[in-house]
């Protein structure tokens, strides 16, 4: 089916997320205005205005009341989802690379970049405690001594945060003790994205080392590897099928030396268990920076370096396709 | 010596003490000039060697000049009247190797004694003279015996009792040709990847209808420092190191031999695999020539070293081998030197004098050398074929207006094609010793070696020729010509009677290389590098294009030795991204893609020549139907086993996964109260699915505005 093209960003898309019901898509880009769209028809609902720099990350609370964005203007901002009102500005020393609401939406976290002599840290705020936000005093600061955090999500039930690092490591950080619980190094290049499966029992990591890998969330046991011939920028697990989708492509700086004809900017579908590629979706004319499945698994979206978000609804054949075994 | 050192040490200690005292005193009083002269009872116990040992080493010795002197025996005995003439002759022969400083002709009763002494300016010249003139035939009765004077000392000290050298234990490396025993004729190849960090030998595991991942036979980090080479028959793998070359072989790829040659850069095997030639550009340190060394491959002994003249623009291989490995040859400015491997000396002790020889090449099947000389003052340019060792000229072809020649032998040695670049105008550039040609056109001189008197045909081409290649064992040739974007590929066939006919011209192609299958008939046209890796597979039996495809930015095309597969690669040495090698069938069907981090080089392991006689091959070809049935059945079987294996593997994977899932689902169920607590008691677990069930389409109507328009009723 023909995809819906969401054209509301002036620069490359950095992250896209669905809300829990899947009726809304939240997108952020290197321009400073994150947007929210109807997933059904691609109509833009509104923007969150206030940032003065590239927005690296976006998240929405489970009840779709609040939106969190992290930006290169050294702020992480909390918005009222419905009105677009800025609820809080959390100032940081460096750019905010990843952010997220916890399962309950009562706490939020973000990670900062390691630049200008400032260390890379995870900050955790309790949203219910307004003094924390107004005084800019986070409930918890977890420093990451080793390598910079390039992707982070909450673990299930708010016990720990799963972080992906620039050197390819994936770790668990306990949010109460700040300790590093587990650390595995299956990738040898930066982790670009981490996404959890619907029941949070598995996570998939996307790395610049041309692979995406599936891990058991609780133990970070390496389960599967999906190999491609390009850096992988984002990977997502289907909520209904045993499928994963990988988005990526040659880095923007190398694009001129490669051919677009070969279709290196395709979204690639792999079977989750067999690690075999079975389908590709083309369309972007730049690398894909973020992919996300609709919570009902019947469509998915991809956002690319080309500034477009494409919402693809699967054809019935997709659901009929079976691997022989 | 030890005692000396002790003395020195104690003296040093004393001195430092006194300096301390001086310092203390000096701080109070006016500093006194220290006394440097030796005390009266001082005995100088330092030897000169200790003080200036390095200088003394350079002190001239009595024996210094001795290495420069050669002794020549078997010189004709002549009277005083003819000494001057003899000296002239001797000078002529020996001044080739360097300046002669002194010459001494011992006389007895007014006659020379039959031996003479010559002194050169350097030992290198003397050695060169010995190497080249020992055994020189002056005339029928006089064959020179030339030795270094210093050699006399060496041979005087030879012990009388001969001690047999200890036998070297035999090291069994197993069957070097084990890979040929594979019943399915599976080929191996070497690959270098990770930018040269890793080298592996792989086994190609593609059969006609089933594809499997290649099997790694051997993988070693830092196996080679630059690149690898297979020997011509595939028995050995050569790796390059700073210190020299190592050869590997056998089933486990054990080291077979090492050849120490610091800084080695280029190597070449003799076709028979008996000799190895290595080249190092490092400046030669010792007196022996060692820019190029020829080794006995099996024993590892150095057979002979050569200098490498940098003046002639030589291209590797400098030494070219005859097909049987009996002879090897090189050319310098005005000579063609042919050496015998039985003695490692010049054939008949002299080089062929061919003034201004530009290039030569051996026939791949017979001991024939083809060479060409350019135009010289009213003498036309010439291509000559000579037989070795008889040196008989068997064919001479005069050519006019020649700018350049390139010789291409057909692999069986049936034909020689000389590509001649001709000009319509030549202009001498005055200040430089070069000629500028204009109006270049091309033609091919086709020599039919197998026929009597070697008839020659001519094919002309007005356009720039980019590549030329013979069908390895057939009568066809193809060449690429024209300027981009109007590049064409022409195919020709030589009929049994000798008639050259054009078969087909493929126009407007993007190709700059052409690769014939080693079995003939099929050819791959490739537009490598700047032509983006366009590939075209052509069957020349009926001149059909079987496939037009591309391997983007491909840098290399390699046919496997059986002509069943083609490997194309994007080498990291040529292009920094998308490094991979792909394997195609000979019809141009893509069989396998192997992306590989910083892949550098793929080389198929060569196979030795078939041991079947032409009659046997004919017999096989006749009964091909019978064989192909058998092979097809095998292919089917293999394909079905591959798919059953795959399905079994999948089944196993899914079982494991399902076990994991049920566990996780139980856990998930177990934690439900916790989730409810976190989200204020709202169950969001199957929100996605439920949302759809409750989804109803609702049409909401708004009144936007009411407008009244008058319509003309007329």
Image (cartoon, grey):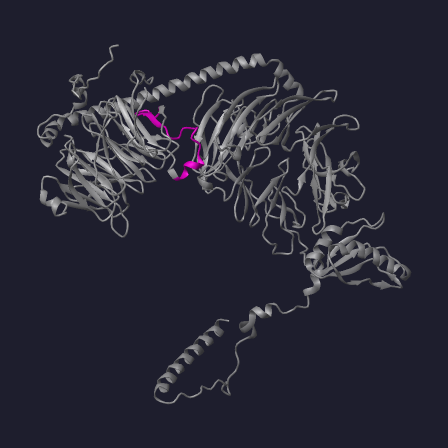
Residue shown at 62% from the left, 56% from the top: B286
Q: Quadrant of the C terminus of chain B?
A: top left
Residue B633 appears anywhere in the view: yes
| Residue B163, position as x, y percentages in the image | 63, 51
Residue B339 appears anywhere in the view: no
**In magenta segment, residue B481:** no
**In magenta segment, residue A254:** yes
In the displayed structure, does residue B421 sit left or right of residue B188?
right
| Residue B673, position as x, y percentages in the image | 10, 28
In the displayed structure, does residue A1 sit left or right of residue B19?
left
The one nearer the camera, B634 or A139, is: A139
Residue B75, placed above or below residue B59: above
In the displayed image of the protein, which residue is found farthest to the front? B714
Magenta part of the chain:
A253-278
The one nearer the camera, B635 or B145, is: B635
Residue B357, placed above or below residue B563: below
Q: Quadrant of residue B513?
A: top right
Q: Quadrant of residue A280?
A: top left
Residue B81, placed above or below residue B18: above
The one nearer the camera, B701 or A76, is: B701
């Amino acid at each position: 089916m023909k995809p819906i093209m969401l054209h509301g960003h002036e620069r490359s898309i950095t992250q896209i997320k669905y809300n829990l019901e899947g009726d809304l898509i939240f997108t952020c880009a290197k321009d400073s205005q994150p947007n929210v769209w109807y997933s059904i028809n691609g109509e833009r609902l509104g923007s969150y205005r206030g940032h003065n720099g590239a927005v690296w990350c976006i998240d929405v609370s489970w009840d779709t009341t609040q939106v969190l964005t992290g930006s290169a203007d050294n702020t992480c901002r909390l918005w009222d989802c419905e009105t677009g009102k800025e609820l809080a500005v959390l100032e940081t020393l460096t750019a905010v690379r990843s952010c997220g609401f916890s399962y309950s939406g009562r706490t939020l976290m973000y990670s900062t970049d390691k630049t200008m002599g400032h260390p890379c840290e995870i900050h955790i705020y309790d949203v219910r405690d307004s003094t924390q936000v107004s005084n800019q005093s986070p409930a918890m600061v977890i420093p990451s001594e080793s390598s910079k955090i390039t992707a982070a999500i909450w673990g299930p039930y708010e016990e720990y945060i799963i972080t992906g690092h620039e050197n390819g490591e994936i770790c668990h950080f306990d949010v109460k003790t700040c300790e590093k619980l587990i650390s595995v190094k299956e990738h040898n290049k930066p982790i670009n994205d981490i996404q959890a499966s619907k029941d949070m029992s598995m996570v998939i990591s996307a790395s610049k080392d041309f692979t995406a890998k599936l891990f058991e969330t609780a133990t970070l046991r390496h389960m599967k590897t999906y190999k491609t011939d390009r850096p992988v920028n984002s990977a997502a697990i289907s909520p209904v099928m045993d499928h994963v989708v990988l988005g990526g492509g040659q880095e923007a700086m190398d694009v001129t030396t490669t051919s677009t004809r070969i279709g290196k900017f395709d979204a690639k579908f792999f079977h989750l268990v067999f690690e075999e590629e079975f389908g590709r979706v083309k369309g972007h004319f730049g690398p894909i920076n973020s992919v996300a499945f609709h919570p009902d698994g019947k469509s998915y979206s991809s956002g690319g370096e080309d500034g477009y978000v494409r919402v693809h609804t699967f054809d019935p054949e997709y659901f009929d396709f079976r691997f022989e075994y | 010596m030890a005692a000396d050192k002790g003395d020195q040490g104690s003296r040093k200690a004393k001195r430092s003490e006194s300096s301390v005292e001086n310092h203390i005193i000096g701080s109070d009083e006016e500093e006194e000039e220290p006394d440097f002269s030796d005390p009266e009872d001082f005995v100088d116990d330092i030897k000169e060697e200790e003080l200036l040992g390095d200088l003394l080493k350079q002190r001239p010795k009595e024996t210094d000049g001795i290495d420069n002197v050669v002794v020549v025996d078997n010189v004709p005995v002549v009277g005083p009247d003819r000494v001057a003439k003899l000296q002239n002759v001797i000078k002529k022969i020996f001044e080739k190797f360097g300046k002669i400083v002194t010459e001494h002709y011992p006389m007895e009763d007014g006659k020379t004694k039959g031996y003479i002494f010559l002194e050169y300016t350097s030992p290198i010249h003397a050695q060169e003279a010995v190497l080249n003139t020992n055994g020189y035939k002056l005339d029928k009765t006089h064959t020179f015996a030339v030795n270094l004077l210093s050699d006399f000392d060496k041979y005087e000290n030879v012990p009388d009792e001969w001690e047999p050298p200890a036998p070297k234990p035999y090291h069994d490396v197993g069957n070097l040709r084990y890979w040929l025993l594979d019943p399915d004729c599976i080929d191996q190849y070497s690959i270098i990847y990770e930018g040269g960090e890793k080298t592996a030998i792989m086994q190609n595991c593609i059969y006609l209808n089933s594809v499997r991942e290649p099997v790694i036979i051997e993988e070693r980090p830092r196996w080679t420092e630059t690149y690898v080479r297979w020997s011509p028959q595939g028995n050995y793998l050569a790796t390059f190191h700073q210190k020299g070359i190592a050869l590997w072989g056998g089933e486990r790829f054990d080291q077979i031999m090492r050849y120490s040659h610091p800084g080695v850069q280029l190597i070449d095997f003799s076709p028979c695999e008996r000799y190895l030639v290595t080249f190092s550009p490092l400046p030669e340190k010792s007196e022996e020539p060692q820019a190029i060394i020829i080794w006995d491959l099996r024993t590892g002994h150095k057979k002979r070293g050569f200098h490498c003249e940098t003046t002639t623009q030589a291209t590797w291989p400098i030494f070219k081998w005859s097909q049987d490995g009996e002879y090897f040859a090189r050319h310098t400015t005005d000579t063609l030197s042919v050496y015998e491997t039985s003695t490692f000396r010049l054939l008949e002790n002299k080089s062929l004098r061919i003034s201004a020889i530009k290039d030569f090449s051996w026939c791949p099947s017979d001991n024939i050398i083809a060479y060409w000389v350019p135009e010289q003052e009213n003498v036309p340019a010439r291509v000559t074929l000579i037989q070795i060792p008889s040196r008989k000229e068997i064919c001479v072809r005069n050519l006019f207006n020649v700018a350049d020649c390139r010789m291409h032998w057909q692999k069986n040695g049936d034909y020689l094609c000389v590509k001649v670049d001709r000009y319509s105008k030549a202009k001498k550039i005055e200040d430089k010793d070069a000629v500028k040609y204009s109006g270049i056109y091309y033609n091919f001189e086709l020599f039919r070696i197998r026929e009597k008197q070697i008839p020659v045909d001519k094919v002309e081409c007005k356009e720039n020729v980019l590549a030329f290649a013979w069908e390895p064992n057939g009568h066809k040739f193809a060449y690429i010509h024209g300027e981009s974007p109007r590049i064409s590929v022409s195919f020709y066939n030589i009929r049994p009677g000798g008639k050259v006919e054009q078969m087909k011209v493929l126009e407007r192609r993007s190709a700059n290389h052409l690769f014939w299958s080693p079995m003939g008939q099929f050819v791959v046209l490739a537009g490598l590098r700047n032509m983006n890796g366009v590939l075209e597979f052509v069957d020349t039996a009926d001149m059909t294009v079987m496939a037009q495809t591309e391997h983007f930015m491909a840098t290399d095309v390699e046919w496997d030795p059986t002509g069943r597969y083609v490997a194309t690669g994007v080498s990291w040495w040529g292009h920094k991204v998308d490094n991979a090698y792909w394997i195609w069938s000979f019809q141009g069907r893509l069989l396998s893609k192997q992306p590989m981090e910083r892949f550098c080089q793929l080389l198929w392991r060569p196979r030795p020549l078939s041991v079947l006689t032409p009659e046997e091959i004919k017999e096989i070809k006749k009964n091909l139907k019978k064989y192909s049935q058998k092979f097809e059945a095998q292919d089917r079987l293999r394909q079905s086993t591959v798919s059953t294996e795959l399905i079994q593997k999948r089944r196993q994977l899914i079982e494991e996964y399902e076990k994991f899932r049920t566990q996780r689902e139980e856990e998930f169920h177990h934690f439900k109260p916790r989730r409810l607590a976190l989200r204020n008691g709202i169950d969001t677990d199957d929100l996605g699915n439920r949302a759809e069930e409750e989804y109803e389409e609702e049409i909401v109507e708004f009144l936007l505005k009411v407008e009244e328009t008058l319509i003309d009723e007329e």
